[in-house]
Amino acid sequence: MDLQSFNPWWKAGKVSPEFTGRKRKIFDEIVRYVDKRQIVLFTGLRRVGKTTLMYQIIDELLRKDVNPYSIMYFSFDEMRYDLEELIKQYETDVLREDISKKKVYIFLDEIQKLEGWPSKVKLLYDANPKLKLFLTGSAQITMWQGTRESLAGRFFDFMTKPLDFEEYLEFKEVGIDKSREKIFEKDLKRHMSVFLKTGGFIEALDMDEPVLRKYLKESLLERVIFVDIPQTFKLDLPDLLMKLLTITASRPGFYLDYKNLSNDLNVDQRTIANYISYLEYALFLQKLYNYSSNLLTSEKKVKRLYPCNTAFTLALNPQADLPSVLEQFFVNSLDAKFFLKTPQKEEIDIIHAHDKVVLPVEIKIKEKIGKDDIKTLFKFLEKNRLNKALLVTLDTETKFEREGLLIEAVPYWKYWSIKERTR
C-alpha cells in the first residue's frame, strides 16, 4: 500500500495550504482534546469538512514541532486494507520502531468502511497507551453495531455539521451587526435564501443552481444511498432509500405512517421502518416525537419526518414553498426532538427542550398573524405551567401577553434574536 501519497508531510515537513482550508469554530473546541488519551471521533455528513479538520490538526501538530514521521493519515474511503497490516507497514517503513514505544498520532478517515472497526480500534487503543487516535465516520456510526458499548470511556464524539448561518456569513465575508438586525434586513433575507439552498456545505457556497443540484444529488445523496449505506448494511433495495428521502423532501414534516407507506410502495412495514432508520443513521432524515413529559409515551405516539438539511429538500423538490423550507430550517438548526399534536388536532411545530427548559416554538410564515395563530401556544403554556413561547414569523415582530404568559413574535431573518431566545 502507498502510505506516502496519504502523508506528504513525511517529505515536505508541512501540510499544503490547499488541504487545510479555513478554520471553523469546532476546530478550537477539538484542539483542546489533542493531548487527552481518549480517541477523538468526528461524525457527520459527507462533504462537511471532517477530513479538512484532520489536516488542520496535523498542521497544528507540525507547527508544534511534532516529528512528521510520528503522524500517519489513512483513508478507508476507497482503500480496503486491514488495520493491523496498515500499522505494521507504518512501523516498518516510516516509524522504524513499535508504536508503543513513543508518542504517535494516527488519523483514520471513513473508519466505518473498515469491517469490524470498533473491536480492531479497541485492541489498538488498549495495547498502545502512548497512541493518540483520530477517526472520522460519514454517519452516526456510534448508533449501530454496539459501538458505544465496545468503545465505552475510550472516545470523545464530535458531530461535525455543515456551516450554520452565522458561519456561512463569515465564510462569505458578509459584515452584519448582530445587535442591529433590522438595518440589515434585506441582506439577511437575501443571504438566508442562498443559505437554504446550499445547506452550509462549504464547497457549494458559490455554485449556481444547476451545478448545485447536480453536486448535492451526485456527490452526496446518491453516493451515500447507492454506495455507502448498502456497503454498511448489505441492502437489497437502495432505490427504496431514495424513494423515502424523496417523499420526505416533497412533504417536510409529514406524519410518519408505516402502514400507508407500505401500501403506497408495496413494501413490508418492517422494511420501511428499517430503511428509515438507515437514512437516520446516514444523517439524511430527522425524526420528531410527539411531546409528552413521559418519554416512553412520546416513543409510542405519532412521529414526524424531515430531511436533515434544507439543501436536500430543495435539490429533490425545487418547488418547495418558503413556509415549509423555513419550518424545516428551524427544526434542523434547533436540533428539534419534539412537536405537539393533541387528540383535538392542536399542533405546535417544535417543543424545544434544552437544559430542562421547555420552549414551544411555532413557525408561521405569512403576512398577518391572528388570534388563531397563538391560541394553541397559550393553551400549552397554561397546561404545562410555562410562561414563554416563541412565534417565528415572516415580518411580524410583537409581543402577545396574557395573565403573566408571554409569546414573542420574531421574524425568521432575525437569526441572532431567535438564537438568543432558544438557548
Image (cartoon, grey):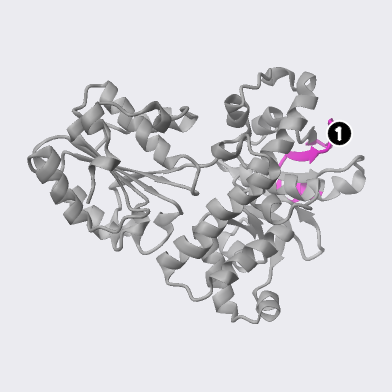
- Tag 1: residue type? Thr
Asked which quadrant contains residue 204, the reply is: top right
256 relative position to 354: left or right: right
40 relative position to 104: left or right: right
Q: Nearest the camera: 121 or 303?
A: 121
Q: Residues within 10 Å of mark 1 (few under 14, many from 20)?
A: some
Q: Quadrant of the C terminus?
A: top right
What residue is drawn where x is 77% and y is 47%?
A: 382
Q: Position of residue 410 (x, y in %)?
A: 78, 33
Say if the magenta span includes residue 56. Answer: no
Asked which quadrant contains residue 31, the reply is: top left
Q: Nearest the camera: 137 or 119?
A: 137
Above or below for 87 versus 416: below
What residue is drawn where x is 83% and y is 37%?
A: 394
Q: Nearest the camera: 240 or 139?
A: 240
64 relative position to 255: left or right: left
Q: Nearest the camera: 213 or 159?
A: 213
Q: Position of residue 144 (x, y in %)?
A: 41, 62
Whether residue 308 is visible here, answered yes or no, is no
Helix, strand or loop under label 1: loop
Which span is picked out in magenta? 379-407
Asked which quadrant contains residue 90, the reply is: top left
What residue is drawn where x is 76% and y is 36%?
A: 412
Above or below for 222 versus 58: below
Q: Position of residue 406 (x, y in %)?
A: 79, 36
Above or below for 153 versus 203: below
Q: Give the residue at mark 1.
A: 396
